[in-house]
Image (tube, helix red, strand yellow):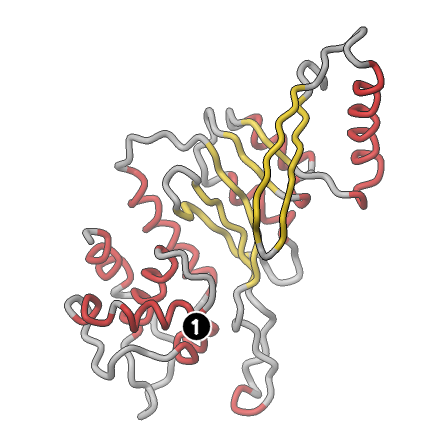
Amino acid sequence: NNSIPSIIEHFQDFPDPRREHPSKLHKLIDIIVIALCGLLAKCETWDDIADHAEERAEFLKSLLELPNGIPSHDTITRTFSILDPELWQDYFGTWMKAQTAGSTEKIKHLQIDGKVLRGSRTTGNGKRRNQKREAVQIVSAWSSEQQLVIAQVTVQPGSNEIKAVPALLEQLDLEGTVVSLDAMGAQQDTTTAIIQGGGDYLVALKGNQGRLHQAAQDLFEDVQRDQGRFREVPLQEKSFDVAHGREETRVCFVLYGFR
C-alpha cells in the first residue's frame, strides 16, 4: 500500500509524550501507523484496531520495526489518550489533505459528525493522579466517495461541537458539495458558512428545537392536506433495511420551492 510509507514519513517526528521507562516497549510511530491502518480498515474501537493489527502482523512487520510485536489495545489506548490533541489534529489534517489533493474525484457529499474518543478521559486517580483530563471530543468531515475522514477539529475544553463545526468548514472546499449534519448543524452560522462556501446542506431537526422543528412539521402537514390542489405534491421514496437487529422502513418526502 503506497499510503503506508507516507504515513511513516509524515508522523515520524511526532513528539512522543511518554516518559522513558522499561515498560515502554513500543515505538510511537508503530502505534500511530497501526491505529491509522485500523481506521482505514473501518475499525471502530481500540480492540478492533489491535485485532486488525494481529491479523495483518506479517504485513506490518515488513514495514515497521515492532521490536516487541504488536502492541495491545490497552497500550494503543493509553498512548493516544496522552497525545496532544491539537498537535494531532494538525498532523492528521495535513496528511489527509495530501492524500486527497491528487484525487480527480470531486467530493459530492460530506458528512459532519462529532465523536468522543474512547479511553481519552483520565480521572486523576491511581497512577494518573496528576493527569486528570476530560475526554477528547472531535468533529470530523467524512467523504462518502473516498471513504475517508478528510478533516477534523478538536472541541476546545469548555466549548461544544456546535462551535467547532464552523472552524471545520473553513478547512474544506465546499463548492458543489452537499454537507449533511445531525441536529447540531441546525445553526444559522453553520448553514450560512456552507452556502457561502458554494455548498448545500442537509440538516436534521429534533423535537427539542422548538419553533424550527414545528415550522418544518407544519409545512409538510399543510402540503399533505392540500394534496396538490394548490401546491406541488411532495416526492416520496420508501426504503427498507435490516440494521442493528431491527427492521427499519424509511419514508422520505421532498418539497421543492419552499424557503
Quadrant assignment for the C terminus: top right
In the picture provided, is 249 more to the left or to the right than 62?
right
**Badge 1 is on which residue?**
47
Residue reaching furthest left? 62
The image quadrant that residue 193 belongs to is: top right
Q: Vertically, is 234 above or below 80? A: above
Q: Residue at x 57, y 51 (%)?
A: 243
Instruction: Tell me which amino acid carries mark 1.
Output: Asp
Q: Residue at x 36, y 62 (%)?
A: 38
Residue 153 screen position, x and y as percent? 50, 52
Residue 195 screen position, x and y as percent? 57, 26
Q: Vertically, is 213 above or below 66? A: above
Q: Residue at x 44, y 47 (%)?
A: 151
Residue 95 screen position, x and y as percent? 32, 51
> Can I make out residue 14 in this image?
no
Q: Vertically, is 181 above or below 124? A: above
Helix, strand, or loop for circle 1?
A: helix
The tally of labels here is 1
